[in-house]
Image (spheres, helix red, strand yellow):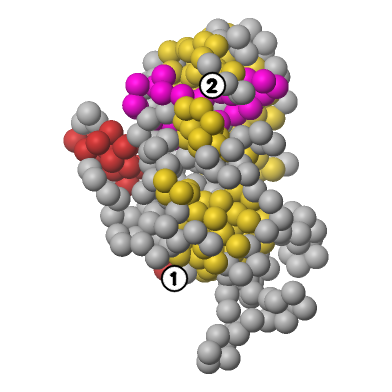
Amino acid sequence: MVSLRRLWKYGAIVAIVLLAAGCASVPIDSSWGDLSLIGDESAPNVLLAFTDRIIQVDPADGSLIELRDSSGNVRVDDQGNPRRWQVQASTNPPSHFYSRPVRVNDTTLVAASYENKLYEIDVAAARIDNPDGVALPGNVVGNPLLTDSFLYMPLSNGGLVALDPANLTETWRFTGDEGKGIWSQPLLIDDTLYLSSMNHFLFALDAQTGVEKWRLDLQGAVASTPVYANDALYVGSFGHKLFKVTLDGQIAYEFATSDWVWGAPAVVDDTVYVGDLGGNLYMLTDTGTSFSQVWTRKVAGRAIRMTPLVVDDTIVVGSRDHFVYWINRETGEEVFKREMRGEVLSDILLIEPNETVREPTIIVSSIAHEELLVAFTLEQGERRWAYGL
């Protein structure tokens, strides 16, 4: 059980940990959402799954996408107002979405709720085609992974299930994490599936059968997907550690952090950037034999849960202290910061210039309903728009 002192320190972050551990029955609200891109690669839209809904937003102005018919005409409601891209499951109590939907074919998204259900969504109509959902054997907070053969679904109350993506039926199930939970997206490399678990272990499974190949104790709960780079895995744990792990399950070396590491590191060539729940940000060099610290900075007043966004000479991170920070990549010094209305827990999305967005733009999500999404320019941090409920 997490101590009361830790609960006070990490608040909403730890609340969901306690939830998955069986200390509560249903979530009051989602503690974070998930951002992804969907649609035309030349001008993609932002897809946000958060609390009881999934929405599709225009990154140019923050408006909900209008629904159109097969002829390209805007669909309207009974009052003649444009219909917008928003999906909610008609359930009581409401469904909660923590993980991103996946597109299983040209017409259908599949979205998993915390409440053990899998919904099929008609993309063109923004409509759930199976209102009762497909039953899952557990709760979902981590992102699923879709391949040609399987839809891998991590279960936050224990294990992973591999589904047939054509009919969403179970093919096999892994339960070797002893019910502690998989909170992050699985990683597939060749024929091996890597799983981070809240029971302190990193698992390697046969991707076709689910048979365990090896397990490695990382000295604390592991809440993020390993990063594959330099022919190895980089992953942090709640044991105040960042690890480099070989593909055959050996710790190559490790680095001690000041606090829990929740988010995945960002790896650029032989440089690693990672934040911790104490608000610290680290820049490390992977020398091939060890991690060498370049700098460490107390960047934020509260936890950094997300993966740092590294673009050119800048690192951008958000924090539970309601701020987004632009950090000089070479020195670790703050360049400037921008305030949000709520805690920033999810990874930041980068929108490259395209047909509708004229300059590099970042999309930041907070847990405040009145400011779910905010768009800032990457270079100057100018606020372009905000979207709220």
Please, is residue 211 above or below residue 330 in the view?
Answer: above
Q: Which residue is drawn at 80% across and 58% down?
A: 42
Please, is residue 231 above or below residue 121 in the view?
Answer: above
Disc 2 secondary structure class: loop
Distance (Cα) linking label 2 and label 1? 41 Å
Q: Residue 189 colored magenta? A: yes
Observer-nearest of 329 and 67: 67
Horizontal side of 72 relative to 63 (left or right) equals right
Q: What quarter of the picture does the C terminus occupy?
A: bottom left
Residue pushed farthest bottom? Answer: 79
Residue 333, percent from left and from top: 56, 39
Which amino acid type is shown beneath numbered disc 2?
Answer: Gly
Q: Residue 380 colored magenta? A: no
Residue 139, percent from left and from top: 38, 41
Observer-nearest of 375 and 223: 223
Horizontal side of 111 relative to 233 (left or right) equals left
Disc 2 designates what residue? Answer: 210
Looking at the image, can residue 385 be seen? no
Q: Give the quarter of the image for residue 199.
A: top left
Looking at the image, can residue 173 be seen? yes
Disc 1 secondary structure class: loop
Q: Of marks 2 and 1, which one's residue comes earlier in the chain?
A: 2
Please, is residue 165 above or below residue 122 in the view?
Answer: above
Residue numbers of the magenta segment? 174-197
Which amino acid type is shown beneath numbered disc 1?
Answer: Leu
Indicate which disc residue 389 carries: 1
Q: What quarter of the picture does the N terminus occupy?
A: top left
Q: Residue at x 41, y 23 (%)?
A: 175
Prevailing secondary structure of the magenta residues: loop
Q: Give the quarter of the image for residue 13.
A: top left
